[in-house]
Amino acid sequence: MVYAPLSIVAAAEAFLPSNGAVSHQIESPEMKTPPKQILLVDDEPGVRQTCSLLLGIDGHSVVEADSGLEALAVFATDRFDLVVTDFAMPGMNGSDLARRLKQLFPSQRILMITGFPNRLEDCQHPVDAILPKPFSLDELRQAVAQLLS
C-alpha cells in the first residue's frame, strides 16, 4: 500500500488532454528531483491514481494511461523523461510495452512496477529498473530520481 502526506500539497490541477489520458500537476515545496514529464501506465485505477498523486507531489507532470496500447497512442504526440509501467496488464503487458518503446526510442528510460518481481527474473525485459509492489513513497522517489539523474 502506498501512502501520501497530503498535508504538503500546495496546489493541484487536473485536466483531460485530447487523447483521453488523464494528467495531473501538483506543486509542493518538498521536491526531491527537478520536475519532469512522466507517463504512468497501469490498468488498476487506484494504483495509477495514487502513483500519479505521489509523483505530482514532487512537482512532476504526469500523464496517465490505462493500457499499453493507450501509452503507445500517447507517444504518438508526446515524449516523456520517464515511463513508469506496471508489468501485469491485459492485452499488452509492461515488458511488451517497454520493448516497443525501446524500439522506437532506444534512450527512453523505463521503470517497471510489479507485484510479480520473481516472474521478471527469468525473462528478458528492456526496462531500466524494477520496483516491486508494495512500495513506499521514498522507494518510488528514489527509483524515479535514480532514473532521471
Image (spheres, helix red, strand yellow):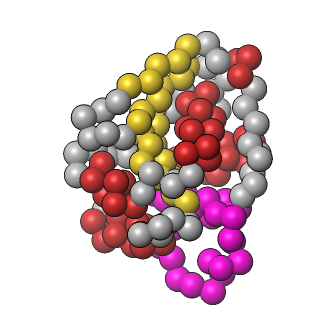
Quick check: can you spot residue 35? no
Query: Would you say residue 124 sits in the magenta stretch?
Result: yes
Q: Picture coordinates of residue 60 (x, y %)?
A: 51, 32
Q: Which residues are magenta?
A: 109-132
How many labels sit on residues? 0
Residue at 66 percent across and 42 percent down: it is 141
Q: Is 67 above or below relative to 8?
A: below
Q: Is 29 above or below relative to 50?
A: above
Q: Picture coordinates of residue 16 (x, y %)?
A: 35, 30
Residue at 64 percent across and 63 percent down: it is 114
Q: Quadrant of residue 106?
A: bottom left
Quick check: can you spot residue 27? yes
Q: Picture coordinates of residue 78 (x, y %)?
A: 28, 44
Of residues 39 and 105, the one nearer the viewer is 39
Residue at 75 percent across and 54 percent down: it is 134
Outermost residue, top direction?
10
Q: Is residue 59 rendered to the left or right of residue 73?
A: right
Q: Is residue 104 rendered to the left or right of residue 25?
A: left
Q: Is 146 above or below relative to 113?
A: above
Q: Is residue 2 rendered to the left or right of residue 112?
A: right
Of residues 136 and 107, the one nearer the viewer is 136
Q: Picture coordinates of residue 69 (x, y %)?
A: 34, 60
